[in-house]
Image (spheres, helix red, strand yellow):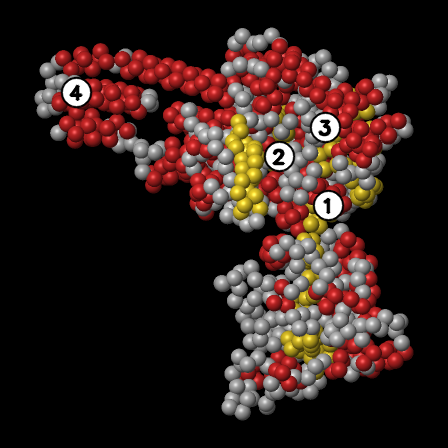
């Protein structure tokens, strides 16, 4: 048969047959009898089974009439699918027999759907054919190809026609009208959509889903497949190029909703997530906003299934609850996709776990009784005679859990009874034999190990500075403990696949038995505040009205405007008649404070107070179950905790009273590693940084290949490094869209989010009062630190530091000592700058300049200290190596910008050169991996200079305007030092480093001198290699030992020792034997070779 040319193809007969009045965008009247009759006439032309198929997807008859038709003729489908000029044809224009054979199945009929071409707004050729008898899918037994698209034609979009009445209803929702389109416009509806980026668009897949969404009054377009949004060859040439039809809708500020199918295949979780992420990133790169629509997969796979099963209102709800793309990407890494037992119940009860299960994971919302459920399991294990060890990451939390489990905490027992105890609670910081707890992992072989709040415990174990000194020891004992446990129970409201997999590996790869509770509370209202001062203003109103408040804050110290100490001072001044209790890390460990040791007794003690102000010290794992006391919960989240920790704090009071929350838009806790939000790039960056540090450490001693091999040989922490990367990626992602992530999580937990408006005048007054209280309180704190009686010795300091109970005076002494050790003196200005985080910047500046000669030796000592513990944990090792952070600034020649009184601007050649160096791919990657900033070619040169200077504690200050560049006067800047005492501190550090170097040199000489008499004695005896090999061997061994010891000192000292030996009279007798038997990695061997060659 001969098919017509593409330009001569007929338009959809449904559209062609509509009266003229239905093509006019000015017709906004209700449906007329003529309209209904015409729609009915068109519907009657569609085969009954096709109509049933379309209606079963919640598509209205109006949409069906305009966009769908039945193809009942033998060759109707061919004319729609085989129009491409790329298809092989005979001389007469007919397609080949093989093509006809390929498409023989469509001769039995089917339905066809096509819409318009968005680039022209004219009817489009491209569409979709659903055959009544689909052909088998090649290579997929039992599968069929349900939908056919035009063969060898560019894939288009499903941009379906909409009748004027429905079109007007859709546009009015967004403040627009069909009247905005020109009178001669082929499709007024889509013209208005194209030309108004404030109209949001829903992206879905397939013709039926698109039609269902349009029927539900949404602006929707459909892709042919979830990956079909770029041009045909874009993957190889221009991978970020949208299809032309889609590109004309991609305008800055436009909001796109992605409504892909929900995955129902548990064997392939997240099957469509990659496509969602790619499309979302592409939209964002063009300045668009993106939201992800999600729903319960049990209510339907596709959006049309959801509407059919639950009604259009169900889609309206998930549309309104769509989450920001940044939130969605952040939470991808934090999923738990496995569940052996999926439940939906208020409390974890009536659950039977097979006794044969060794690894039990529990993911259940806060307040569903996880701790109570574990308590019953603990008691059951104790009854059958098993030892039970429960681990936590905070002492107070551990004590509270032990009270609930009915077991002793480690400090409740004397040292001699801890190993013999049948049960014990312990903080993971003490999980090694050198700790105060004296933990012996062998004593807990075969025990039941319980880790509640396991995600936070593992992050603490891998990242907390309190574990840094003994982390390798702790991780090794933790491995042994879990490997030899008879049963392990882990639980967390946010339990994820990464943590479950890690425990499974430690236990020999066994499968975990995971209980996942999907129960959702109706928790009541959560009020969202635009500013923290607005929330504080409302707190005063609530107190005046007689409310009893539980307030959770991020900060504790006096320097913060929103800290527990400052708010306590301010509220006590305003409400002297109210009983106010402050619970933070200082008060609960201060024997003189009423909150001392209160955590295990919270439910009894808190009822005595009108206002409780708490810090994160009680945020995790502690449940406040008292009822009828607190009338509201108030939270200020400044970005210093993970978003999950904030939600934990919000839910700490279990009673469903109103929540009032302020959260910053972006987390300030700081990025981990290179800041990646995916674990694989972060893991690779850690591995690369580790190798760079090791090669710098071994420079001039070993070849690159040997250094890499050696670091791998001594590092047994690959599984821990992987888990670190996974949890760090979750952390990094959690800092992006921080407030949105918190409120999205609250919404999913069952809260109704209500926005609160700011009371500007009242808010200004509140903030002014708080600032006054802060300034006064902070000034007093600094004075107390500076004027306190200083400690006299390191032992005094260590005693206070290691103590779990400290008075405020003792804390001031501790801080005074630390400041003195850091800077050499204690002044108010130094304490303030230290509080602002200047120490690492100033130290980095010193290491890049005056202190550069001392850095390699310090790095070597830090590495030896870690390897002495039996391993090398990459994140800690990288942080300890300061050379890797100093060298970039030396290579970039930053010093020349510091030692100058000149001004700088974007057009300076040296500033441009710095920009080119720092933004080169290799340099930008290494600066990022060592936490020195993210740089790209889009940044202005002066911006790069400012960022690098900030890492050293300097800044740029605008001083004037210079010459005209591109019609604007160029800004001129000068470098300013933000650390006034820099030169004094640098001199102090240099003096201490030099004294330390000389002391080490003297010690090395003293040690070397101990073997000198023996060398002289042996040398005075007549010896030769031939006559007395044993005597010569003893002498050689003695020299080898001395060279080995000398190699541990400075290179200069070693070189002097080698020279002395070579110049001595005995060298001619034993030199060859020494060289042959000296370790080939000993740098003395190379020195001997070089020196011998020069003298020869």
Q: CA distance from mark 3 to mark 4?
A: 70 Å
Q: Which residue is mark 4?
A: 1063
Q: Nearer the viewer, mark 3 or mark 2?
A: 3
SS class, disc 4: helix
Within 10 Å of disc 1 (Cα), the crowding (few <14, some 14-19, many 20+) is some
Q: CA distance from mark 2 to mark 1?
A: 20 Å
Picture disc at residue 562 = 3
Residue at the spot x=26%, y=20% of the render? 1042
Which sits earlier in the primary sequence, circle 2 or circle 4?
A: 2
Q: Which residue is mark 2?
A: 669
Of residues 148 and 499, the one drawn nearer to the viewer in this rendering: 148
Within 10 Å of disc 2 (Cα), the crowding (few <14, some 14-19, many 20+) is some
Picture disc at residue 396 = none
Within 10 Å of disc 3 (Cα), the crowding (few <14, some 14-19, many 20+) is many
SS class, disc 1: helix
Q: Nearer the viewer, mark 3 or mark 4?
A: 3
Which sits earlier in the primary sequence, circle 3 or circle 1?
A: 3
SS class, disc 2: loop
Furthest-front residue in view? 963
Asked whether, in this view, residue 306 is left or right of residue 824, the answer is right
Q: Nearer the viewer, mark 3 or mark 1?
A: 3
Mark 1 and mark 2 in contact (Cβ < 8 Å)?
Answer: no
Residue at the spot x=75%, y=58% of the render? 299
Picture disc at residue 744 = 1
x, y (%) of residue 506? 53, 39
């Amino acid at each position: 048969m001969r098919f017509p040319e593409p330009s001569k193809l007929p338009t959809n007969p449904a559209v062609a047959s509509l009266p003229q009045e239905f093509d006019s965008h000015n017709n906004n009247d209700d449906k007329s009898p003529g309209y209904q009759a015409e729609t009915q006439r068109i519907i009657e032309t569609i085969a009954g089974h096709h109509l049933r198929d379309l209606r079963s997807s919640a598509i209205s008859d109006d949409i069906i009439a305009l966009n769908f038709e039945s193809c009942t003729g033998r060759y109707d489908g061919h004319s729609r699918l085989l129009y491409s000029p790329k298809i092989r044809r005979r001389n007469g224009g007919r397609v080949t027999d093989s093509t006809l054979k390929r498409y023989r199945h469509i001769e039995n009929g089917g339905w066809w759907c096509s819409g318009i071409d968005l680039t022209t707004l004219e009817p489009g050729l491209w569409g979709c054919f659903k055959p009544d008898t689909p052909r088998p899918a090649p290579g997929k037994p039992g599968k069929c190809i349900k939908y056919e698209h035009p063969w060898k034609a560019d894939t288009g979009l499903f941009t379906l026609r909409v009748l004027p009445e429905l079109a007007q209803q859709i546009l009015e929702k967004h403040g627009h009208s069909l009247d905005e389109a020109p009178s001669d416009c082929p499709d007024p509806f889509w013209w208005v959509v194209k030309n108004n980026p404030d109209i949001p668009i829903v992206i879905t897949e397939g013709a039926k889903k698109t039609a269902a969404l349009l029927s539900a009054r949404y602006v929707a377009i459909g892709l042919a497949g979830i990956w079909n949004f770029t041009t045909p060859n874009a993957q190889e040439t221009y991978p970020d190029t949208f299809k032309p039809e889609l590109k004309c809708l991609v305008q800055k500020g436009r909001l796109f909703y992605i409504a892909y199918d929900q995955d129902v295949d548990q064997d392939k979780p997240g099957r469509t997530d990659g496509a969602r992420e790619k499309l979302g990133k592409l939209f964002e790169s063009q300045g668009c906003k993106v939201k992800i629509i999600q729903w319960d997969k049990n209510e339907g796979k596709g959006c049309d299934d959801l509407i059919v099963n639950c009604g259009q209102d169900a889609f309206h709800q998930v549309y309104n609850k769509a989450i920001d793309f940044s939130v969605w990407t952040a939470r991808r890494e934090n999923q738990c996709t496995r569940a052996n037992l999926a439940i939906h119940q208020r409390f974890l009860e009536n659950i039977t776990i097979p006794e044969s299960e060794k690894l039990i994971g529990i993911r259940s919302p806060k307040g569903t009784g996880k701790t109570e459920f574990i308590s019953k399991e603990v008691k059951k294990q104790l009854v059958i005679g098993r030892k039970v060890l429960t681990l936590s990451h905070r002492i107070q939390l551990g004590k509270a859990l032990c009270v609930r489990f009915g077991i002793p905490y480690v400090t409740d027992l004397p040292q001699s009874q801890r190993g013999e105890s049948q049960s014990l609670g312990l903080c993971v910081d003490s999980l090694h034999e050198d700790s105060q707890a004296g933990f012996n992992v062998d004593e807990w072989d075969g025990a039941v190990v319980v880790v509640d709040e396991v995600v936070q415990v593992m992050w603490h174990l891998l990242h907390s500075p309190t574990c840094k000194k003994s982390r390798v020891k702790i991780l090794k004992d933790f491995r042994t403990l879990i490997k030899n446990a008879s049963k392990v129970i882990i639980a967390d409201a946010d339990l994820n696949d990464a943590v479950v997999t890690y425990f499974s590996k430690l236990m020999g790869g066994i499968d975990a038995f995971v209980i996942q509770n999907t129960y959702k509370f109706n928790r009541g209202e959560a009020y969202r505040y635009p500013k923290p001062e607005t929330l504080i203003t409302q707190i005063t109103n609530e107190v005046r009205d007689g409310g009893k408040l539980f307030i959770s804050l991020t900060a504790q110290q006096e320097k913060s405007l929103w800290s527990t100490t400052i708010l306590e001072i301010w509220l006590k001044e305003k409400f002297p008649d109210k009983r106010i209790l402050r619970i933070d890390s200082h008060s609960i460990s201060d024997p003189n404070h009423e909150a001392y040791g209160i955590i295990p007794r919270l439910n009894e003690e808190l009822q005595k107070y009108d206002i409780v102000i708490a810090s994160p010290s009680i945020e995790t794992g502690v449940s406040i179950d008292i009822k009828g006391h607190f009338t509201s919960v108030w939270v200020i989240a400044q970005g210093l905790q993970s978003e999950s920790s904030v939600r934990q704090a919000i839910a700490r009071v279990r009673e469903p009273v109103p929540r009032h929350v302020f959260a910053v838009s972006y987390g300030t806790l700081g990025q981990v590693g290179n800041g990646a939000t995916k674990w694989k790039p972060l893991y690779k960056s850690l591995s690369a940084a580790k190798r760079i540090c090791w090669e710098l450490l071994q420079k001039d001693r070993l070849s690159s290949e040997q250094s890499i091999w050696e670091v791998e040989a001594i590092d047994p922490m690959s599984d821990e490094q992987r888990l670190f990367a996974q949890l760090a990626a979750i952390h990094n992602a959690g800092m992006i869209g921080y407030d949105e992530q918190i409120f999205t999580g609250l919404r999913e937990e069952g809260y109704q989010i209500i926005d609160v408006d700011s009371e500007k005048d009242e808010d200004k007054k509140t903030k002014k009062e708080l600032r006054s209280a802060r300034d006064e309180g902070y000034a007093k704190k600094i004075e107390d630190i500076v004027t306190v009686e200083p400690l006299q010795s390191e032992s005094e300091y260590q005693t206070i530091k290691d103590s779990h109970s400290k008075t405020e005076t003792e804390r001031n002494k501790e801080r005074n000592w630390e400041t003195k050790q850091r800077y050499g003196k204690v002044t108010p200005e130094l304490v303030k700058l230290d509080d602002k985080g200047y120490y690492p910047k100033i130290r980095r500046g010193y290491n890049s300049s005056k202190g550069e000669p001392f850095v390699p030796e310090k790095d070597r000592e830090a590495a030896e200290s870690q390897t002495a513990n039996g391993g090398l944990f990459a994140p800690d090792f990288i942080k300890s190596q300061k050379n890797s952070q100093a060298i970039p600034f030396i290579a970039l020649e930053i010093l020349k910008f510091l030692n100058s009184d000149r001004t700088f601007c974007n057009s300076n050649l040296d500033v441009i050169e710095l920009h080119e160096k720092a933004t080169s791919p290799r340099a930008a990657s290494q600066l990022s991996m060592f936490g020195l900033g993210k740089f790209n070619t889009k940044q202005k040169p002066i911006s790069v200079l400012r960022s690098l200077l900030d890492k050293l504690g300097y800044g740029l200050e605008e001083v004037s305007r210079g010459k005209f560049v591109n019609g604007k006067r160029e800004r001129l800047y000068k470098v300013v030092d933000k650390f006034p005492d820099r030169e004094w501190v640098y001199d102090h550090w240099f003096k201490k480093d030099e004294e330390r170097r000389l002391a080490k040199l003297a010690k090395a000489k003293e040690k070397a001198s101990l073997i000198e008499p023996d060398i002289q004695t042996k040398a005075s005896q007549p010896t030769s290699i031939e006559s007395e090999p044993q005597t010569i061997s003893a002498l050689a061994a003695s020299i080898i030992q001395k060279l080995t010891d000398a190699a541990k000192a400075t290179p200069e000292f070693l070189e002097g020792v080698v020279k002395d030996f070579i110049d001595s009279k005995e060298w001619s007798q034993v030199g060859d034997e020494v060289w042959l038997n000296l370790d080939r990695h000993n740098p003395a061997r190379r020195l001997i070779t070089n020196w011998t060659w020069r003298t020869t």
